[in-house]
Image: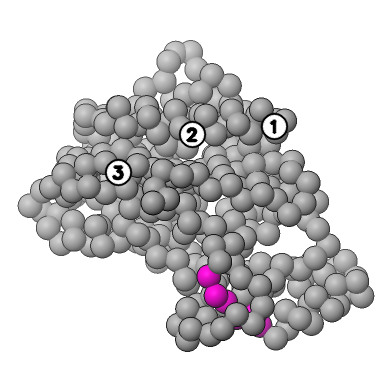
């Protein structure tokens, strides 16, 4: 089993920055391999760790892959089954018991991975940590509580922890850059609650360079515009010289639906894909087009690949959340 194994995706170019990305509840690092390919940042090494098995109190202590336990009370706060104001929910959330043991274990794993990147010569300001759901929570928690700092934190559909709002005084993370993306139709972590808690931790830790962006119509998941915005955030924190090659343009969804044989390159996880005809044209014209045309075609290729990834990716915890949501008022 690959459970607990960390995946390292080496950069195609010179390694000058690192992104450590943590999956969500019931997730695995493999599902984010294509995400790393999609972003087309050849100077970045992507590190994809794996959580271990835990017992989920919210679901009858069922064994699941996760970074920490979630209690029924915690879920009620996040989904706002009480139908209360975010500020009220926030105060109630502060009193919830946290799975401190699992959180500490998960943070320690992340801290070790950060130290690995520092040991190979990557400056701390050239390291971004982040993730989805629970993974985003662990990334932010470590960034806020570690003695030093990293360049930035990127969080998608983030879960909350009471300890995120318990900073030692005085404390400051005024050089830390934080970007949070959240669905405007998220019924697992209500967007009003998420935004309220975002402003709270920024105030508590004196985080000055932070952005919370809500995406209308998006649920507990990802979207094309969100991933494109995430890429822009990464470029602002860990910029690099993109190689003068256009990224391969894939059609992962069509290949997975039709079982098409490999007609071009494969994704990082080895799955079979087909390639758009104009991808070959891109490759042939690489040395003939001007910078302006090249940048335009590169943006088009990246947008296509992000859209393809978003259409292919499915939250592995969706079945858990769907089941819980149906009986939310009985928890």
Q: Can residue 168 be seen by looking at this rendering?
A: yes
Which residue is situated farthest in the top direction here? 170
Which residue corresponds to the image point at 57% horizontal and 76% vertical from the top-left?
273
The label shown at residue 110 is 2
For residue 241, side relative to residue 133 (left or right): right
Which residue is situated farthest in the left direction here? 330
Q: Magenta span covers which residues? A: 271-276
Quadrant of residue 201 in the image? top left
**Residue neighbourhood size for the residue with mark 3, other residues' Cα within 10 Å, grouped as few (<14), some (14–19), many (≥20):** some
Tell me, yes or no, whether the highlighted magenta stretch contains residue 274.
yes
**Given this view, does label 3 or label 2 mark the residue nearer the observer?**
3
Point out residue 282 in the picture as x, y percentages from the top left corner: 79, 77
Which residue corresponds to the image point at 24% horizontal and 57% vertical from the top-left?
320
For residue 246, side relative to residue 289 (left or right): left
The label shown at residue 120 is 1
Q: Is mark 1 on a helix, strand or loop?
A: loop
Point out residue 20 in the picture as x, y percentages from the top left corner: 55, 42
Which residue corresponds to the image point at 63% horizontal and 33% vertical from the top-left?
117
Marks 1,2: beta carbons within 8 A: no
Q: Which residue, given by chain and number where applicable, does mark 3 sit on?
A: 53
Foreground residue among 87 and 62: 62
For residue 15, side relative to residue 61 (left or right): right
How is the rendered protein coloured?
Answer: one colour
């Amino acid at each position: 089993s690959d459970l607990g194994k960390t995946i390292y995706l080496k950069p195609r170019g010179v390694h000058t920055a690192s992104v450590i990305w943590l999956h969500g509840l019931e997730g695995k690092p493999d599902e984010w391999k294509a995400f790393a390919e999609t972003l087309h940042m050849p100077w970045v090494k992507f590190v994809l760790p794996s959580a271990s098995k835990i017992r989920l109190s919210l679901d009858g202590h069922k064994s699941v892959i996760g970074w920490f336990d979630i209690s029924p009370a915690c879920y009620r706060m996040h989904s706002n089954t009480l139908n209360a104001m975010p500020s009220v929910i926030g105060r109630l959330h502060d009193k919830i018991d946290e799975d401190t043991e699992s959180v500490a274990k998960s943070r320690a794993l992340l801290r070790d991975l950060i130290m690995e990147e520092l040991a190979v010569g990557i400056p701390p300001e050239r390291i971004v940590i982040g993730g989805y759901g629970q993974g985003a929570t662990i990334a932010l928690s470590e960034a806020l509580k570690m003695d030093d700092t990293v360049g930035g934190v990127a969080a998608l559909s983030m879960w909350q922890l009471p300890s995120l709002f318990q900073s030692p005084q005085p404390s400051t993370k005024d050089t830390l850059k934080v970007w949070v993306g959240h669905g405007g139709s998220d019924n697992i972590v209500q967007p009003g609650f998420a935004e309220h808690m975002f402003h709270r931790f920024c105030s508590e830790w004196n985080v000055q360079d932070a952005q919370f962006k809500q995406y209308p119509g998006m649920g507990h998941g990802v979207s094309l515009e969100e991933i494109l915005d995430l890429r822009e955030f990464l470029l602002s924190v860990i910029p690099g010289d993109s190689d003068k090659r256009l990224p391969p343009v894939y059609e992962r969804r069509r290949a997975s639906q039709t079982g098409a044989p490999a007609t071009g390159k494969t994704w990082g996880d080895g799955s079979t894909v087909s390639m758009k005809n104009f991808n070959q044209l891109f490759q042939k014209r690489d040395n003939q087009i001007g910078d302006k045309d090249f940048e335009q075609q590169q943006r088009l290729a990246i947008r296509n690949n992000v859209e393809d990834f978003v259409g292919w990716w499915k939250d592995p915890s969706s079945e858990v959340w769907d089941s819980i949501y149906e009986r939310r008022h009985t928890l």
